Image (cartoon, grey):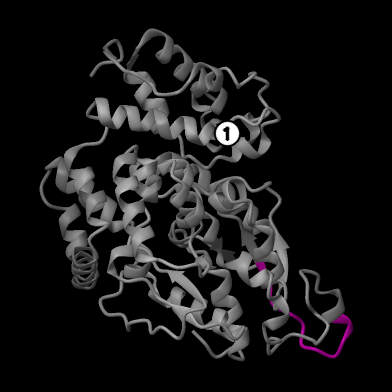
């Protein structure tokens, strides 16, 4: 499709919503793609103008697809917007229209997304990938001839983290709360779940684990415009997590999507389910006094400031930089509980970038590596300015994206678990 080609497109966004943007430009400094490219069409304001034009004409072109696809969907613009524009929902509707009416999402990519909801297939594929990494087959794949598919697949898999071949299973300990384990995170980062479970249990609560039907929340599908798949997965997740117990999420992207099941499905059942969903730090912050004191924490050191701890005879507290995942800060607005919980055990080092995106964006960093890398450079520079070597991030995508440039990034509750265990837990 050349830039001059147009095609029919029907956007399911009402005119009042499209007109809600007053083009003030307050979003521009908070948009990572605009900051990197400087292009108006790469900003929320520019993209909404393109949506409005496409809706009026009933058609779009390749440039429209390019700029819609280049959005990281960090939703930092929503936090900055004085008019309260629901940009995220507009972008989701636009991508859904593209995915359902055009070839926006290729068949192979659709199959890859579908595999996320198949735990056995995902587990097998992950173990195969981990074994291939250890045998050096990934590098060989990227060097196979000049065939473009091999080069692309090789480059993509070469940038992935070292995937575990074997992982010990998690064990339920009660039914006070559900701990949602998800798809990729459980396949690649189960030890994070293990640490999170240990912290929850330290409050005296028992943890229930989801059955196989609740393996994927549909977040990545929603980003890709495959909203029908997200709705299908949402129904599965809801059916697999019955009752009234809180559903705790340790992945910011999953939590943001599951909290919006009511909007996605439009049913009372979905709204009630979404009301049970909490980021795990939100739940812990409400029970902060139930958490034990850390091994390196003075008795009165219960906040982000280290002044009390430094004034006592306690060992000076570890300093940790906090990187706010966009879907925790801008969508859930649950970034402060991270500080409340983590600050009980370490000194918080704040970044000076006002929560700007790191560039991960779910699968975005794999599909737009150059822009994602440029955005990451800004985040890495902000981290470097803190003078801190350890970074806390409550989202697996952000963690893996930042680790790829050598940063020591951990889930906040992995750090807490280490302190609860006297610093002996890996």
- Magenta stretch secondary structure, dominant: loop
Check the image and report above or below for 374 versus 34: below
Q: Residue at x 45, y 61 (%)?
A: 396
* Residue reaching furthest to the right: 311
Where's residue 306, x and y in %?
A: 80, 74
Q: Secondary structure at mark 1?
A: helix
Total numbered labels: 1
Check the image and report above or below for 260 versus 32: below
Q: Can residue 104 be seen in the rendering of this structure?
A: yes
**On the image, which quarter does residue 79 sit in?**
top right
Q: Is residue 127 left or right of residue 9?
A: left
Q: Residue at x 53, y 69 (%)?
A: 411
Check the image and report above or below for 291 versus 96: below
194 falls in the magenta region: no
Where's residue 35, x and y in %?
A: 57, 33
Where's residue 24, x and y in %?
A: 68, 21
314 falls in the magenta region: yes
Mark 1 crowd level (few <14, some 14–19, many ≥20, 10 Å Cα): some
270 or 321, which lies in front?
270
Quadrant assignment for the N terminus: top left
Where's residue 419, x and y in %?
A: 62, 84
| Residue bounds of the magenta highlight | 310-320
Q: Residue at x 46, y 62 (%)?
A: 403
Q: Can residue 360 be seen in the rendering of this structure?
A: no
* Residue reaching furthest to the front: 268
Q: Is residue 46 left or right of residue 293?
A: left
121 or 283, which lies in front?
283
Q: Which residue is mark 1?
A: 35
């Amino acid at each position: 499709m050349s830039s001059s080609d147009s095609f029919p497109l029907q956007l399911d966004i009402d005119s009042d919503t499209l007109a809600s943007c007053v083009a003030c430009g307050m979003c521009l400094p908070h948009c990572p793609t605009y900051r990197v490219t400087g292009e108006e069409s790469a900003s929320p304001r520019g993209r909404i103008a393109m949506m409005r034009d496409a809706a009026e004409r009933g058609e779009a072109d390749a440039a429209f697809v390019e700029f819609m696809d280049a959005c990281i969907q960090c939703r930092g613009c929503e936090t900055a917007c004085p008019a309260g524009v629901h940009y995220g929902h507009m972008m989701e509707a636009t991508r859904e229209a593209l995915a359902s009416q055009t070839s926006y999402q290729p068949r192979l990519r659709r199959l890859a997304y579908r595999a996320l909801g198949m735990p056995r297939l995902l587990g097998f594929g992950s173990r195969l990938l981990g074994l291939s990494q250890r045998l050096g087959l990934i590098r060989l794949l990227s060097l196979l001839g000049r065939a473009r598919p091999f080069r692309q697949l090789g480059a993509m898999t070469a940038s992935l983290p070292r995937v575990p071949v074997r992982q010990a299973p998690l064990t339920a300990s009660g039914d006070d709360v559900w701990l949602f384990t998800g798809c990729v995170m459980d396949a690649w980062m189960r030890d994070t779940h293990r640490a999170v479970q240990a912290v929850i249990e330290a409050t005296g609560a028992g943890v229930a684990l989801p059955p196989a039907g609740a393996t994927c929340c549909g977040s990545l599908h929603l980003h890709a415009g495959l909203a029908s798949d997200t709705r299908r997965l949402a129904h599965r997740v809801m059916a697999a997590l019955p009752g009234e117990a809180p559903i705790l999420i340790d992945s910011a992207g999953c939590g943001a999507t599951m909290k919006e099941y009511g909007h996605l499905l439009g049913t009372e059942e979905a709204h009630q389910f979404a009301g049970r969903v909490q980021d795990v730090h939100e739940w812990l912050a409400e029970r902060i006094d139930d958490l034990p004191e850390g091994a390196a924490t003075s008795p009165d050191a219960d906040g982000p400031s280290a002044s009390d701890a430094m004034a006592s005879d306690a060992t000076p507290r570890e300093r940790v930089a906090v990187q706010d995942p966009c879907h925790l800060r801008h969508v859930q607005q649950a970034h402060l509980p991270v500080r409340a919980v983590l600050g009980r055990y370490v000194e918080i080092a704040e970044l000076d970038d006002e929560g700007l995106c790191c560039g991960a964006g779910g699968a975005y960093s794999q599909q737009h590596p150059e822009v994602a890398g440029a955005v990451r450079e800004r985040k890495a520079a902000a981290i470097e300015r803190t003078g801190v070597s350890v970074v806390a991030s409550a989202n697996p995508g952000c963690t893996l994206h930042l680790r790829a440039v050598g940063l020591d990034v951990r889930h906040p509750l992995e750090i807490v678990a280490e302190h609860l265990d006297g610093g002996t837990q890996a």
